[in-house]
Structures are given as C-alpha cells and as structure tokens.
Image (cartoon, rainbow, N blue to C red):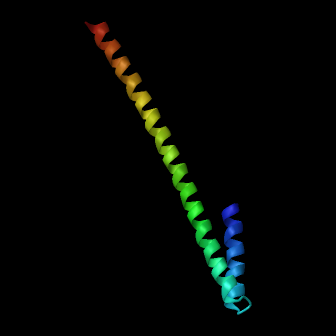
Amino acid sequence: MKKLLFVAVLGLGLSFAACGGANSDAAASADSLANATTETIDSTANAAVDSVNATADSAKASVDTAAAAVKDAADAATK
C-alpha cells in the first residue's frame, strides 16, 4: 500500500515537473527523494529476503538433525 502511494505521489510530481510547473530545484529534490525512497525499499526487501532465507536454513538444519537422529535410532534398533 505504501509503495502504491509512493508511485502515485511520484507520478503526480513527475507530471507536475514535466508540465513546467516546478522549478529545477524542486525537480532535483523530487529525484533525490525518489532515489532515497527506492534505496530504502530495496534495502528493506533485501533484509526481509535474508531473514526468510536464514529461517529456511535453520529449519532445514533442524529437519536434517532430526532425520539423522531417527536414522541412528533405526540403525541401533536393527543391530
């Protein structure tokens, strides 16, 4: 939702600048804000992906440990 609002506001700002209604300082500020916001969104998304990957790796390690314990128990029971 925030991203949609950002895109809408950015679109209005770019339309305003394209029509000559904004001076170069305002256009530069809009570009700077857009770049900073995009970088923030990218870093937040990357952090979320890293967190999900870490959780998945941890869960896989737990499953592997449990599987090894079951295998060891089965091997011990057959001996």
Residue at the location (72% across, 79% down)?
12
Q: Residue furthest left?
A: 79
- Front residue of 60/51: it is 51
Q: Residue furthest bottom?
A: 20
Residue at the location (58% across, 71% down)?
35
How many labels, in total? 0
Residue 45 at x, y = what percent? 55, 55
Q: Is residue 48 above or below residue 28?
A: above
- Front residue of 73/8: it is 8
Horizontal arrangement in the rendering, residue 72 relative to residue 25 (left or right)? left
Q: Quadrant of residue 26?
A: bottom right
Q: Residue furthest front?
A: 25
Horizontal arrangement in the rendering, residue 1 relative to residue 77 (left or right)? right
Residue 46 at x, y = what percent? 51, 54
Horizontal arrangement in the rendering, residue 58 relative to residue 5 (left or right)? left
Residue 53 at x, y = what percent? 47, 44
Residue at the location (62% across, 66% down)?
37
Q: Quadrant of residue 27?
A: bottom right
